[in-house]
Amino acid sequence: MKWSLSQLKSTRETPLQFDEALDLKHPLMTRYSEIMDVKTVHVKGIASYDKDSVLISAAVEATLTLPSSRSLTPVDVPLAFQMTEYYVPQGTDLSRFDEEVDTVIILPEDDILDFDVAVEDNILIHIPMQILSEAELNGEPMPTGKGWEVLSEDDLADQAAELKTVDPRLAKLKDLFPDQEDKD
């Protein structure tokens, strides 16, 4: 979806309402190579023109297929979030936006608003850092292989505690430099 600022300016009295299904599979997979699949992205919202700026507020729903961060198994990750952005023409005084903390201000090129790119950006921002399959969430054993295994943070902490125990034959070396503190 693309709009020009002049097109949106003509809708001052009644905000432009939209309820669209966007096909963003190719651009999202191009921008973030770990995405395996993108279901249709649904956006519903309004675009209103006020005081030489355009406010777009939209609810976004999408489902991405991403690899599990533990086993690389494909996992469908549903995303649902609200996005609010101001589009301001070049040369506009931005001081009125200083008071609003979570304001996203975009200066469009050539006065064209490419809303698809804005939705793509917001989807990429909302991808979780840790993605786990249902089996991994339910406590299924961690993946292992020949000479390697995946450890949970608790297991890693236990293993580190075991390694901190000092061999009694080397314990006397600790007294060799009494003025130095243990820097662990």
Image (spheres, rainbow, N blue to C red):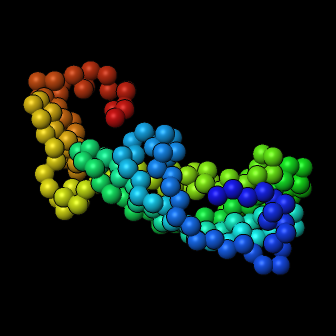
Total label count?
0
Image position of 3 (left or right of 58): right
Query: Residue at horizontal 53%, vertical 59%?
Result: 22
Q: Does residue 70 appear in this view?
A: no
Q: Position of residue 115 (x, y in %)?
A: 65, 56
Q: Does residue 21 appear in this view?
A: yes
Classify 7 as above or below 143. Answer: below
The answer to which image quadrant residue 88 occupies is bottom right
Which of 92/146 is in front? 92
Which of 163/63 is in front? 63
Query: Residue at horizontal 55%, vertical 52%?
Result: 120
Query: Residue at horizontal 86%, vertical 49%?
Result: 90
Image position of 74 (left or right of 95): left
Pick the quarter of the image with the C terminus.
Answer: top left
Classify 18 as above or below 143. Answer: below
Q: Position of residue 133 (x, y in %)?
A: 25, 56
The answer to which image quadrant residue 46 occupies is bottom right
Classify 90 as above or below 47. Answer: above
| Residue positioned most to the bottom | 13
Query: Residue at horizontal 22%, vertical 39%?
Result: 160
Image position of 183 (left or right of 4): left
The answer to which image quadrant residue 164 occupies is top left
Pick the quarter of the image with the N terminus.
Answer: bottom right
Q: Position of residue 31 (x, y in %)?
A: 51, 41
